[in-house]
Image (spheres, rainbow, N blue to C red):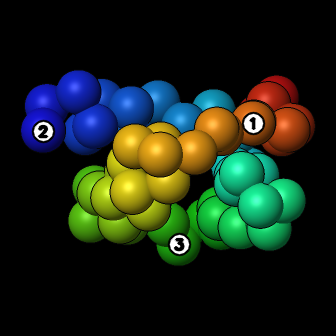
Amino acid sequence: MNFWRNFSIFFSTFFNKILIITKNNTRKIIKKSNKNKNLKTSAKIARSAKSCYNHQSIIFRTKPHP
């Protein structure tokens, strides 16, 4: 669980969007807004990423924050 917390904090801090491309080519985009800088939202992002990561590939196409 600690890994996914760190994972979520890292990506919610440095990236605007997380684009998840699944095996059947459906796309799921998690967008970051300024309101989403708290740990609760980071945990939600981590859970979404974890559920996809377990059986699918994740591709990050994002703009790093300046």
Residue neighbourhood size for the residue with mark 1, other residues' Cα within 10 Å, grouped as few (<14), some (14–19), many (≥20): few
**Marks 3 and 1: in contact by CB < 8 Å?**
no
Q: Residue furthest front?
A: 24
**Marks 3 and 2: in contact by CB < 8 Å?**
no
* Mark 1 or 2, nearer chain start: 2
Taking depth in this image into account, of 30 and 58 the one nearest to the observer is 58
Residue occupying image coordinates x 35% and y 65%: 44
Residue occupying image coordinates x 65% and y 64%: 30
| Nearer mark to the viewer, of 2 and 3 | 2
Q: Which residue is labeled 3 in the image? A: 35
Q: Residue furthest bottom?
A: 35
Which residue type carries mark 3? Lys
Query: Element under label 3?
Result: helix
Relative to residue 3, is residue 58 depicted above or below? below
Which residue type carries mark 1? Ile
Taking depth in this image into account, of 53 and 13 the one nearest to the observer is 53
Which residue type carries mark 2? Met
Residue neighbourhood size for the residue with mark 3, other residues' Cα within 10 Å, grouped as few (<14), some (14–19), many (≥20): few
Residue occupying image coordinates x 80% and y 68%: 26
How far apart marks 1 and 2 lie (CA) works out to: 21 Å
Instruction: Tell me residue 8's x, y (percent).
Output: 40, 42
| Nearer mark to the viewer, of 1 and 3 | 1
Instruction: Tell me residue 55's x, y (percent).
Output: 47, 46
Horizontal placement of 8 versus 60: left or right? left
